[in-house]
Image (cartoon, rainbow, N blue to C red):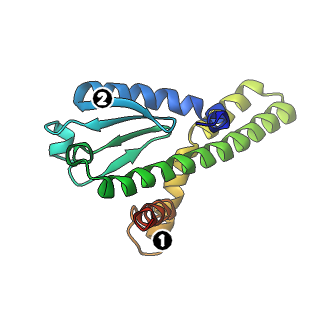
Amino acid sequence: MRWNRFIPYIWTWPFDIIVWLVWVILWAAWGENLRWEQGCLVFNWKVDSWPARTWYRRWGGTTMGHAIFYNWYVKEQNDVERFEPIQVHEHVHVEQFEVWMLSSFIIGLIVQLVVGLGHGEWVTGSVLGGIIWFLGYAWMGIGGWTTALVRGEDAYRSSAHEEAAYAIGDASRDH
């Protein structure tokens, strides 16, 4: 892996640290095969785990920042044709996360500077800027889901970030 692949961690670290802690807790409770995959902390749900048997049984994977979990069938069936599009899809979300976190970092920095320089409120500016930065990934989801709903479409599947990830994941099957 190239060294510059890790540059986005500069503006994603606060979100990643929290998500990695949550991922380790989830893995300890219901997961297996904790590993690093292309710069992301990854695990699989155990076959007999509560998530794999209940609420998560129809999903292939989920991404939060630089962390991914996959459903158990990916590992059990060892089906590369089925797994590769899911893996590509989830890594598209990682790239989207990096973009949104950079945008929110820049906006948060501008807010911090405007409030700090313009009003002398450095603490307030830092708190506001930090909140904007930390919520960068949420802005993507909220914007995409709301826009899809306004268009009269399914909030999740028809959001721009999901449509892009599905298109790229499905295209990986053709290569």
Per the image, the residue denoted by label 1 is 150
Q: Residue furthest bottom?
A: 152
Residue 93: percent from left, percent from top? 49, 51
Nearest the camera: 149 or 175?
A: 175
Give the numbered dot on residue 175: none
Nearest the camera: 1 or 157?
A: 1
Task: Determine the CA span between mark 2 and mark 1.
Answer: 37 Å
Direction from residue 118 to residue 32 in the image, left or right: left
Residue appearing at x 23%, y 31% in the figure: 30
Q: Helix, strand or loop at disc 1?
A: helix
In the image, is residue 157 above or below residue 132?
below
Point out the tag, 2 or 1, that comes first from the N-terminus.
2
Residue 68: percent from left, percent from top? 40, 40
On the image, which quarter does residue 7 sit in?
top right
Q: Mark 2, mark 1: which one is toward the viewer?
A: 2
Residue 110: percent from left, percent from top? 77, 41
Q: Helix, strand or loop at disc 2?
A: helix
How many numbered marks does the figure carry? 2
Q: Amino acid at mark 2?
A: Trp
Quadrant location, the C terminus: bottom left
Residue appearing at x 72%, y 24% in the figure: 123
Per the image, the residue denoted by label 2 is 27
In the image, is residue 54 above or below residue 151?
above
Residue appearing at x 68%, y 39% in the figure: 105
On the image, which quarter does residue 98 sit in?
top right
Direction from residue 23 to residue 48 in the image, left or right: left
Residue appearing at x 42%, y 75% in the figure: 152
Direction from residue 26 to residue 169 in the image, left or right: right
Q: Amino acid at mark 1?
A: Val
